[in-house]
Amino acid sequence: MSARARRSQEDMLAAIRAAVLAELSEVGIGRMSMAGIAQRSGTARTSLHRRWSSPTEILLEALEHSYPQETVSPGLDDLRGDLIRALGFLVEWLATPTARAVESIVVERGRHPELARALYERVFDQKGGRFTRTVLVHYAEHGHLDPARITDVVTDIGEALVLKHLADAGSPPDEAMLARIVDEAVLPAVGHPPAGNRS
Amino acid sequence: MSARARRSQEDMLAAIRAAVLAELSEVGIGRMSMAGIAQRSGTARTSLHRRWSSPTEILLEALEHSYPQETVSPGLDDLRGDLIRALGFLVEWLATPTARAVESIVVERGRHPELARALYERVFDQKGGRFTRTVLVHYAEHGHLDPARITDVVTDIGEALVLKHLADAGSPPDEAMLARIVDEAVLPAVGHPPAGNRS
């Protein structure tokens, strides 16, 4: 494929991803249609059907595409910084339109349980399951943390506190608050010395 | 006041509290009216106006009335059990109609910021601020925990993980999961030995 053809295909995909988020936000999960997404994105319905079997498949592709994958710094010498950066990915993502789409899927899980399940399996789990989990597992695999302490409860602490802060304060935590979440809640749970004992 | 008059006044208050929750759920925060609450509760509007200045005042009274106050067992010898019971109060409350009312206030905080603020100040803060906080402060005040570790982040860990579990699983945590939240996240954050080190 030529660079130009590839470019135009990427533009088309971007338009389709934006269209499915707009469709969701305006008509709701239950009423999304291929025709609506085709019209909003300026794409032929036949092109959509060639690639996807339903509007929710397009939605899942859009969510997967924009969901961040946390990274680990080389060297295994900055657990605290890696954890703060991991929660920073979550905070950045919360400001995107896909975060609102995810929220509406979670809120409507009762009516669309299969979509909520696919969201967790095909988006969250593919990208590490929970923010801070990739970092914690990496340090544990290299002997810097006790693997027995990297449980599902512990890998959820950072994400839970970020989302709780958003719900209580109406805005996501700033960098200083992310550092406090890591120092006061995440690091103690993996057996790290409290902040006062570190340099 | 005679026992009978007091009883009938309590019945009337209960009917008004139920009415304001029904009104909120059916018409939304912005459209609640004294007339609607009067009709739903079978009370004269003049009686409502004598006691409350607005529908949101009635709503706050109903929320305050049903929001649990966590307790501490006598003896200061069961921190773990007291914490699990504190989170149990939250789980029980989540099944009540007032939990849905609180959720809608939090979701709509952008449109009704003064009501959200009143919810925190007049309901949550009056009842201890966060579940587990009353217990942690009590043990710290009696020298069983380092008061410096009882921060706003730390007192939010249990509540954040319970609400996160509800969002992810679609149902609140059971008793075994509450115990894991306490053992793996709350106790380490207050400097308590991990579960493996206890009897």
Image (spheres, coloured by chain):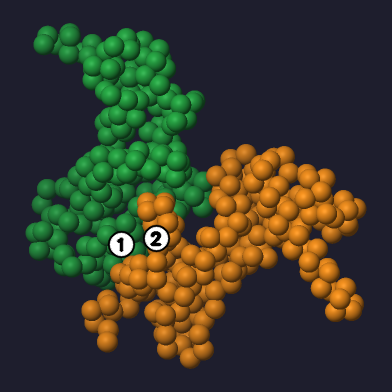
Chain colours: A green, B orange
Q: Indicate the chain on which mark 2 is placed.
A: B
Question: Would residue B24 be visible to someone looking at this image?
Answer: yes
The residue type indicated by label 2 comes to Leu
Residue at which label 1 appears: A153
Asked whether the residues under the numbered discs 1 and 2 touch, taking CB atoms below 8 Å apart as contact, a structural biologist would say yes
Asked whether A56 or B78 is in front, the reply is A56
The residue type indicated by label 1 comes to Val
Q: Where is residue B31 shown, x and y percent of the image?
A: 72, 39
B94 shown above or below A106: below
**Residue pictured at 46% horizontal, 48% vertical:** A166
Question: Would residue B164 be visible to someone looking at this image?
Answer: no
Q: CA distance from mark 1 to mark 2?
A: 8 Å
Q: Where is residue A6 shown, x and y percent of the image?
A: 17, 13
Q: Where is residue B160 shown, x and y percent of the image?
A: 43, 59
Q: How many marks?
A: 2
Residue at which label 2 appears: B161
Q: Is residue B143 left or right of residue B181?
A: right
Q: Is residue B122 left or right of residue B88?
A: right
Image quadrant assignment for residue A8: top left
Asked whether A123 or A82 is in front, the reply is A123
Quadrant containing the C terminus of chain B is bottom left
